[in-house]
Amino acid sequence: MNYTIITKLAMFLLAFSFTTSYAQVHNIKLEQTPGVFIIQDLTLAEGDYQFEIANNGVDHEVGFVLVPKGQYAEANHIKEAYVKTPVATNKSSMTSVVSLKAGDYEYFCPLNPTRKYALTVTGPEKIKLTQTPGKFTTESLVVQEGTYQFEIANDGVDHEVGFVVVPKGKYDAANHIKAAYVSAPVANGKSSMTSVVSLKAGEYEYFCPLNPTAKYPLTVSNNVKNVKLTQVPGRFETESLRLKAGQYQFEIANAGVDHEVGFVVVPKGKYDASNHIKAAYVAAPVANGKSSLTSVVTLTPGEYEYFCPLNPTAKNKLTIE
C-alpha cells in the first residue's frame, strides 16, 4: 500500500470516527373512542416514532400497549411506547421515542379495552455493490426515493476499500452523506454494510477514494403522484377517480365537517377492515380546515372504492387502468 492510499485511508477512518447520526422522530397520532382505535392497523417505515394517544369520549383513562406480534405478556411490552400519563377523557398524552425495526407488531389498549391492531414496519431496501481493482462493477444506479442500505463488497482489491455518496458534483468531505459510509473498511474478499440512507429525489454520485474509482451516477426519482381529495359534510367533492397504475399519495382535506375525518381505500366491494389498503390511511385524523397525507400507495389495475366512515360518505369509484 503506498503513502497516498495510507493517507486516504486515515482520512476516511477519521471522518467515519467523528460521524454522528441524528435520526428524525416521526409523530403518529392515534385516537381512541369507546372500545376502538380510529386508525385500525398501520404500516410504517423502519425508524423512530412518538405516538400521541388521544381519548375521544371514553369516560375513563386509557393507555397504549405495543408488542411484537402475538407476544402479549407484560414482559414483552415495548416500554418506551407506554404513554407518559394515563389519558383522561378528551385529553392526549405522548409516548417516549420508540425505535422500530422491520417486523410485525400489534397495538391495543387494555383499559378501553380494544382488539389487537396490526402494525407492520418495513425495512430499507438493500443494494449490493462490488468493487474490483479501480472500479465498481455496477457503473450507474437509478432508484426510487426511499430508504436504502448499501452492502459494499471487495472482490480482488488488495487493500481495504470504502464507499462515498454525495450530491452530484459535491465531492468535498463536508458533503459526504455520512450514513452511506460503511461500518468498517472492507478488506479483500469481505463486505460491509452502510447505515440506513434516506435518499430524496435528485442526482447523486458514488465512488471509492481508496480504490480509487471514477464517480458513478446515482439517480433518485420520485414518481409518486399527489391526489388531493376534499371532504364536505357527508361526501367527497370528487365522487369518482380514474388513474393510471402507479404510486400515489392522497392528500385528504376537511372543508366544513365539524369533526375529524379519515380515508379508506378497498378493492371494490370488500369493505371489511382486513381488506383496507393500510398505506391509504391518513397519517392523522383530519380536523376541520386541515389536511393530512396518506403513505405512498401502490395501485395496480382494477376496481377500487374510497370512502370515509367518519363523515360518513358514500363509496366512491376508483378505477386504476
Image (cartoon, grey):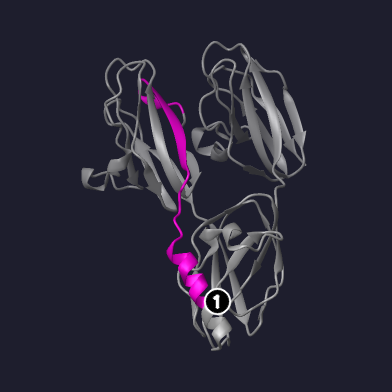
Q: Image check: 110 left or right of 288?
A: left
Quarter residue 126 falls in: bottom right
Question: Vertically, is 249 above or below 167?
Answer: above
Give the labeled residue for mark 1.
8
Quadrant that contains the C terminus = top right
The correct choice, above or below, for 223 with respect to 89 in the image is below
User: Along the horizontal axis of the image, is 266 left or right of 225?
Assistant: left
Front residue of 258 and 16: 16
Query: Relative to residue 78, is residue 243 drawn left or right?
Result: right
Q: Where is residue 59 in the image (x, y as percent from the top left)?
A: 30, 15
| Residue 17 falls within the magenta-colored stretch | yes
Q: Is residue 204 visible?
A: yes
Q: Is residue 249 magenta?
A: no
Instruction: Relative to 117, say whether 315 is above or below.
Output: above
Figure disc tally: 1
**Residue 295 left/right relative to 139:** left
Element on which disc 1 rests: helix
Between residue 138 and residue 248, name the one nearer to us.
138
Tell me which corner region of the image, top left, top right, bottom left or bottom right, holds residue 251.
top right
Query: What residue is at 58 percent from the left and 63 percent from the top?
Result: 173
Q: Residue at x 65, y 63 (%)?
A: 171
Which sits in the foreground, 320 or 98?
Answer: 98
Looking at the rendering, the stretch of residues picked out in magenta corresponds to 9-38
